[in-house]
Amino acid sequence: MINAVIRPKFAESNMAMRAMFAARKQVFVDLLKWDLPVLDDRFEIDQFDTPDARYLILIGADGQHRASARLLPTIGPHILGDLYPHLCDGRVPRGPRILEISRFCLDRNQDAGSRLSARNQLVTALVDHAILQGIDCYTGVAELGWLAQILRFGWQCEPLGEPQGKMGSKIGALRIRIDSQTRTRLERTGIYAPLSLQLVESRESVA
């Protein structure tokens, strides 16, 4: 059950937030079958969707959600620190200039080419956001297949420990360092892409 403290009261003007939570339910609950809380049978919202969370949301010309990610301060509650610290060989990276990426979500209702473009634009938005906000690195937890993709993007990315879990469902922790050369590295691999989708950056409280 979702605690009433985080039950969202969406502003009518912020349809991007509604679309993002709905897309998260379609991807992580309906498609991937993750055991996550669902509000009103429509929105995937968990205990980390608090006023401290930041969101990067990409919206298409049709006004529909295309991709999104949640950013959590590592000096507070976050997935790696609270749920999966055992995935790190050493201490969980924490600090005011370290954010955790979670709920990296690509909308199901787009073809493969559009999904790839949305993925690259979301990675681009994450890098640009970090540079503008003075973020030194991101951390995250990912299933093995997605982790392998992230490591190949071209940025300075390293596993924080050996992936753990059963075969077919292993997960691992990672750290992505962001600096002045990150954009250039991603351009070389074809990941860094100018935005053609509308970017909505939100810290609107969902409480």
Image (cartoon, rainbow, N blue to C red):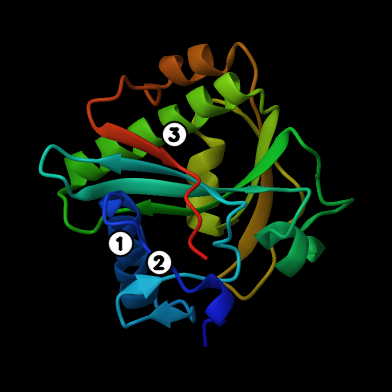
Q: Mark 3 vs mark 2: which is more N-terminal?
A: 2
Residue 156 numbered tag: none
Q: Mark 3 vs mark 1: which is more N-terminal?
A: 1
Which residue in the rendered view is the most extreme toward the left? 62
**Please, what secondary structure does the residue beneath circle 1 have?**
helix
Residue position marked by numbered label 2 in the rendering: 9
The amino acid type of the residue labelled 1 equals: Ala
Residue position marked by numbered label 1 in the rendering: 23
Which residue in the rendered view is the most extreme toward the right? 90
Contact flag, marks 2 and 1 (Cβ < 8 Å): no
Residue 4: x %, y % from top left: 54, 81
Residue at point 61%, 11% (across, down): 180
Residue at point 52%, 82% (across, down): 2
**Please, what secondary structure does the residue beneath circle 3 have?**
helix
The answer for how far apart the CA atoms under marks 2 and 1 are is 17 Å
- Is residue 168 visible in the rendered image? The answer is no
Residue position marked by numbered label 3 in the rendering: 123
Q: Classify residue 131 as left or right of residue 159.
A: left
Residue 55: x %, y % from top left: 47, 46
The amino acid type of the residue labelled 2 equals: Lys
The answer for how far apart the CA atoms under marks 3 and 2 are is 28 Å
Residue at point 58%, 55% (across, down): 51
Q: Residues within 10 Å of mark 3 (few under 14, many from 20)?
A: many
Residue at point 30%, 66% (across, down): 22
